[in-house]
């Protein structure tokens, strides 16, 4: 039996594929390569280039590879872009997820792990924010994920499909073994942007808003190492396999400890030894002031224990991966 990883050539998806291999599983990757990279998928892993919303294609892959679980990463994830292009985000994140679920039901796949987001909470009244807080997305991105969660809940009620929804907080870092990392050149992740500025790949960086009601006026986020995140997915998969009559869960994925934008930048400067240019600019639409995970439930339900809960370590691995990408690019240009 196999596990289908949609978006498995992307940042988090490629880490998931490696984790599955490390655990003796048989991953299959479906990716349209719009933001992912074919080289990020190990040669021994079956790879299908295509769209997760292509029902006939997905159903064929599910049947041919005897897939018993889907881990769904494929999505668009940039909050300001979703504000500018809401219809594009509802298509990519909601309608395509609906088609993927339909293919899963038709092929009889019983297990579904869904990548959701802390953006479903919006600007929460309480921090750390628990899973039972009232959702109030501030952006079409957050709403598109919340709508997918609702569809998954209703589909599981009507069909033989069980799920775990994992609401990510801010994912960062790279594989500690140096096998993969955040590779999208124009990614908007704060730590990647700061690392690129430190390594001269950007002329500096912007801080969007310094007048929030936080300890230093900049946004506060809960940064989770990508390896801890994919470990949570592995535990979610085992949970579904061990609970044949139930087990649907919605869980936060974070450490319960927030860092401000300026604190992250200071960590990157400290770890790189470079004092790069930082510009203070107005707020962006759709950014909550502070959002930190209440992280007790995932520990209780899945027995999840993070191994990389240290901002400097996360930043150090992100810097190492960024240096690898620079070397890779230079080698490609030389060739």
Image (cartoon, grey):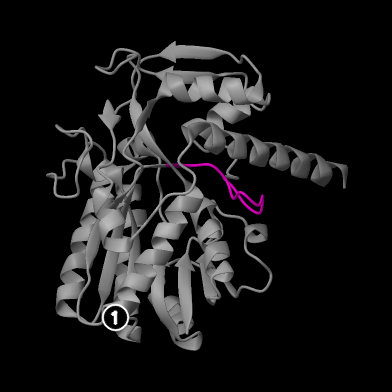
Q: Is residue 82 above or below residue 252?
A: above
Whether residue 189 appears in magenta in the rendering, the answer is: no
Residue at coordinates 50% horizontally, 58% vertically from top-left? 13
Residue at coordinates 57% horizontally, 44% vertically from top-left? 184
Front-lying residue, 310 or 130: 310
Residue at coordinates 54% horizontally, 42% vertically from top-left? 173
Q: Which residue is mark 1?
A: 105
Q: Is residue 209 above or below residue 268?
A: above
Quadrant of the rendered image containing residue 124 = top left
Residue at coordinates 34% horizontally, 81% vertically from top-left? 109
Characterize the magenta stretch by its predominant secondary structure.
loop
Q: Which residues are magenta?
A: 171-181
Apparent side of residue 122 relative to residue 3 in the rendered image (left or right): left
Apparent side of residue 240 relative to residue 327 in the rendered image (left or right): left
Quadrant of the rendered image containing residue 159 = bottom left
Q: Position of residue 303 (x, y in %)?
A: 34, 60
Quadrant of the rendered image containing residue 222 = top left
Q: Is residue 153 above or below residue 132?
A: below
SS label for mark 1: helix
Extreme residue in the right direction = 335
Q: Is residue 19 above or below residue 287?
A: below
Residue 290 seen in the current view: yes
Residue 49 seen in the current view: no
Q: Position of residue 115 (x, y in %)?
A: 36, 56
Q: Residues within 10 Å of mark 1 (few under 14, many from 20)?
A: some
Front-lying residue, 193 or 222: 222
């Amino acid at each position: 039996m196999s596990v289908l990883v949609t978006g498995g050539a992307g940042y988090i998806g490629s880490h998931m594929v490696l984790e599955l291999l490390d655990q003796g599983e048989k991953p299959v990757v479906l990716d349209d390569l719009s933001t992912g990279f074919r080289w990020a998928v190990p040669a021994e892993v079956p790879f299908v280039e295509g769209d997760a919303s292509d029902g006939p294609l997905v159903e064929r892959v599910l049947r041919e590879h005897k897939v018993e679980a889907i881990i769904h990463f494929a999505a668009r994830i940039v909050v300001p872009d979703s504000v500018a292009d809401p219809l594009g985000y509802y298509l990519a994140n909601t309608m395509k997820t609906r088609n993927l679920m339909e293919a899963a039901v038709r092929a009889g796949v019983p297990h579904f792990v869904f990548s959701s987001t802390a953006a479903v909470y919006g600007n929460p009244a309480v921090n750390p924010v628990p899973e039972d807080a009232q959702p109030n997305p501030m952006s079409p991105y957050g709403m598109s994920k919340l709508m997918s969660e609702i569809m998954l809940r209703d589909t599981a009620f009507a069909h033989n499909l069980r799920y775990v929804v994992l609401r990510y907080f801010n994912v960062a870092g790279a594989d500690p073994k140096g096998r993969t990392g955040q590779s999208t050149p124009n990614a908007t992740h704060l730590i990647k942007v700061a690392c690129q500025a430190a390594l001269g790949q950007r002329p500096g960086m912007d801080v969007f808003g310094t007048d929030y009601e936080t300890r230093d006026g900049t946004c506060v986020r809960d940064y989770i190492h990508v390896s801890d995140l994919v470990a949570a997915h592995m535990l979610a998969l085992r949970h579904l396999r061990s609970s044949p009559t139930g087990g649907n869960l919605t869980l936060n994925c974070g450490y319960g400890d927030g860092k401000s934008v300026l604190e992250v930048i200071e960590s990157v400067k400290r770890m790189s030894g470079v004092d790069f240019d930082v510009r203070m600019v107005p707020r962006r639409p759709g950014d909550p002031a502070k959002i930190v995970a209440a992280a007790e439930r995932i520990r209780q339900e899945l027995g999840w224990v993070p191994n990389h809960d240290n901002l400097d370590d996360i930043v150090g691995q992100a810097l190492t991966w960024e240096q690898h990408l620079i070397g890779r690019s230079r080698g490609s240009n030389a060739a």
